[in-house]
Amino acid sequence: MSAAGADGRTDGTDGTDGTQETDAMDAMDESYERHGTQGTDGSRGAARPGRVVIVVLDGLGVGAMPDAGALRPGDLGADTLGHLLDHCHRVHGRHLRLPALGRLGLGLLRPHPALAAATALPVAVGRARLGYDGADTYAGHQTMMGADFSRVAVARLASYTADVTRALKAAGHTVEPLDGGPVLVADGHVLVHDNLEADPGINWNASARLDDLPFERILAVARTVRSVAPVARVIAVGGHADRPLPAYVRRGEGGTVGLDTPASGFYRNGGLRVQHLGAPLDHTRQLPELAARAGASVTLVGKAADILACGDAARLPAVRTGEVLDHTLAAARAARGDGGRQPEGKALVVANVQETDLAGHQQDALRFGAVLEEADAGLDALLRELDGPHDLLLVTADHGNDPTIGHAFHTREYAPVLAYRPGAPESDAGPDAGPGFLPDAASLADVGATAARFLGLGALRLPDADADSGSGSGSSAGLAAGTPLSL
């Protein structure tokens, strides 16, 4: 494993001539040559076989970014992982049981008595800056998959009610303002409103009770709103509430007004239906599409199935953590070839564990901890499955969601990056040198770029990739953004 310092970047843009990154890539190439496959640039034939599994523990930040207090000064103290570990220990009288995350090196990145202080696994650990404004699941995943998310606007619905009203009426919907305010009521039941769970102006929602309308009707309203919305996401939400939804409308931060979704009971009462309608992006330059075009099987699990684009992907939507990890393990096993030593082809699996984020929104650190323990059990099964030299497991997050911070918003925190690669070449220090420590990644896009390079997608580089990426000459595999990490 390549071991780097705690600061700076290892991408050939650190004032050196780029030999550090080149040497790491050459070592990776030599490793694959020993197994009869091609190098990282795609120059020796078809893209190599391999299984890449990316697991996103939604909301599991590992400490505030320097600009975390721009909107809420108190968020400079955010530390989702550390605070929930401390809280669970105080309440339960024991530490959370997280052996798999310990073996993946999380305790090296964020030391804590609940986490192992050492690991014998071939892992590399580090942190990633988010690489987009605010703290949002959709923006986080799109950035992670290689999108340039810098041009999406932050806007309150109040500034666009006239545009939205015209679009809805033109599409045949009825629409009225709720009590003369900025929330709109479409078709008598669908509330169109600011999303109060993300930072102000990041997302809008179209929400209704499934007892009043089928989800398809809610989604139709959301699609019309999406056609005129400048924001990152318009989210169609259907669920079962304790009372009519207007009873849960309140004012939020930054002049927003919307449905208090956690208070409505949607998350608590079961039967939740959600679909995320994202801002227009060039999905052909994101990891799932690039992998599919290279002949890889692509599987999107959990919330990733809702928010990532790939026409050829198998989609396995799920909310329950056990189901998400079971689907992920099954997809990895389906891609196994000859004992995992020579997989028959390439495979990419991207999974989102959503219940961690839901617990953060509910400000329920105990539930967050219980979900994390369940996710850890699923990661343990993945570690046992991904045992071949062509396998890579990346565990990360999309933002923070500190359940102890005093509000129900996401927190702008670094994301952990835990990379497990059974086929990693030995470092110069020998086989017992321990894990590699990665410099802070400039963006979550670096996670996707790392997966792209591991799958050998360099042959799919687009001619203008470097010019558009903003990431310099390290941009990989036609992704619109991202620099591969040196594992």
Image: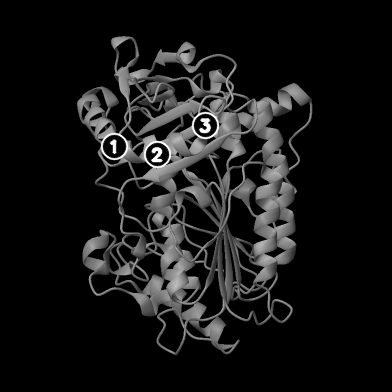
Q: Distance from label 3 to label 2 (Cα)? A: 12 Å
- As shown in the figure, which amino acid type bears the numbered disc 1? Ala
| Horizontal arrangement in the rendering, residue 397 relative to residue 87 (left or right) | left
Q: Distance from label 3 to label 1 (Cα)? A: 20 Å
Quadrant, the N terminus = bottom right
Q: Is residue 247 above or below residue 272?
A: above
Which mark lies nearer to you, 3 or 2? 2
- Residue of label 2: 220
Query: Camera-side residue: 212 or 50?
Result: 212
Q: Residues within 10 Å of mark 2 (few under 14, many from 20)?
A: some
Q: Is residue 398 above or below residue 10?
A: above
- Residue of label 1: 171
Label pair 1/2, CB-CB below 8 angstroms: yes
What colouring method underlies this structural image?
Answer: one colour
Which mark lies nearer to you, 3 or 1? 1
Identify the mark nearer the N-term, 3 or 2: 2
- Disc ID at residue 238: 3
Please tell me whether mark 3 sits on a helix, a strand or a loop: strand
Residue 152: percent from left, percent from top? 27, 43
Label pair 3/1, CB-CB below 8 angstroms: no
Q: Quadrant location of residue 144?
A: bottom left
Q: Is residue 423 above or below residue 199?
A: below
